[in-house]
């Protein structure tokens, strides 16, 4: 409320996340960045243990020719894989992976995407959101 521009941007991202009519869906990269800070519109989904989620990803890959899940096919697994990429890169305050978790991901050829490049308005607002989040905790 102190920053109407950021407030509007946040509301738009929620609509894009929910893929509401008239709103372009978030890209995989945008989803990954928002999930790395546990953004509020992801809170409505219960969390599973790390090992259970890893097993779900492996099951998905077995059923899908070794492919990793994407947001369209399985949003929950896609979000989890993106969160693990962030944890592997130690970005945005994520708790680092344990050595065992890293080993498990590496043995499954887990893809680590390159860091996002800033400069565009989306990334500027995202950076603004991260700063706001750090300052206010919501």
Image (tube, rainbow, N blue to C red):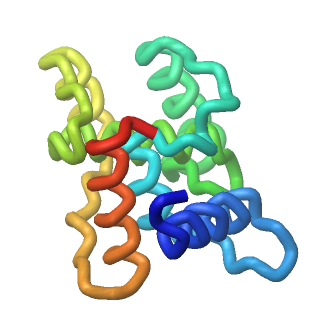
Question: Residue at coordinates 56% horizontally, 49% vertically from top-left?
Answer: 69
Quarter of the image holding residue 85?
top left
Residue 58, horizontal then vertical, whole percent: 50, 31
- Give percent across and percent down for residue 68: 49, 49
Residue beneath the point at 58% across and 29% down: 59
Q: Quadrant of residue 92?
A: top left
Looking at the picture, how far across and down is residue 44, in whole percent?
Answer: 69, 31
Q: Is residue 72 left or right of residue 51?
A: right
Residue lying at 82% horizontally and 82% vertically, measured from the top left: 22
Q: Residue furthest front?
A: 2
Residue sitting at the far bottom: 120
**Residue 13 falls left or right of residue 92:** right
User: Camera-side residue: 113 or 34?
Assistant: 34
Where in the figure is residue 88, as x and y percent of width and height? Answer: 20, 39
Give the answer, above or below, for where 125 lies relative to 46. below
Quarter of the image where the N terminus is located:
bottom right
Asked if residue 96 lies left or right of residue 36, the reply is left
Task: Give the residue at the far right of this rendering.
Answer: 21
The residue that appears at 42% across and 78% down in the rendered structure is 122
Q: Quick one: 58 or 49, which is closer to the camera?
A: 49
| Left or right of residue 99: residue 58 | right
């Amino acid at each position: 409320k102190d920053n109407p521009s950021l407030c509007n941007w946040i509301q738009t991202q929620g609509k894009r996340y929910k893929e509401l009519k008239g709103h372009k869906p978030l890209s995989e990269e945008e989803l990954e960045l928002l999930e790395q800070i546990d953004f509020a519109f992801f809170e409505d989904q219960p969390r599973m243990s790390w090992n259970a989620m890893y097993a779900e990803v492996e099951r998905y890959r077995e059923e899908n020719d070794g492919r990793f899940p994407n947001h369209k096919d399985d949003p929950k697994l896609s979000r989890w894989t993106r969160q693990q990429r962030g944890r592997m890169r130690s970005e945005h305050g994520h708790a680092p992976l344990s050595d065992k978790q890293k080993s498990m991901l590496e043995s499954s050829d887990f893809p680590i995407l390159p860091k996002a490049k800033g400069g565009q308005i989306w990334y500027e607002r995202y950076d603004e959101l991260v700063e706001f989040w750090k300052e206010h905790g919501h």
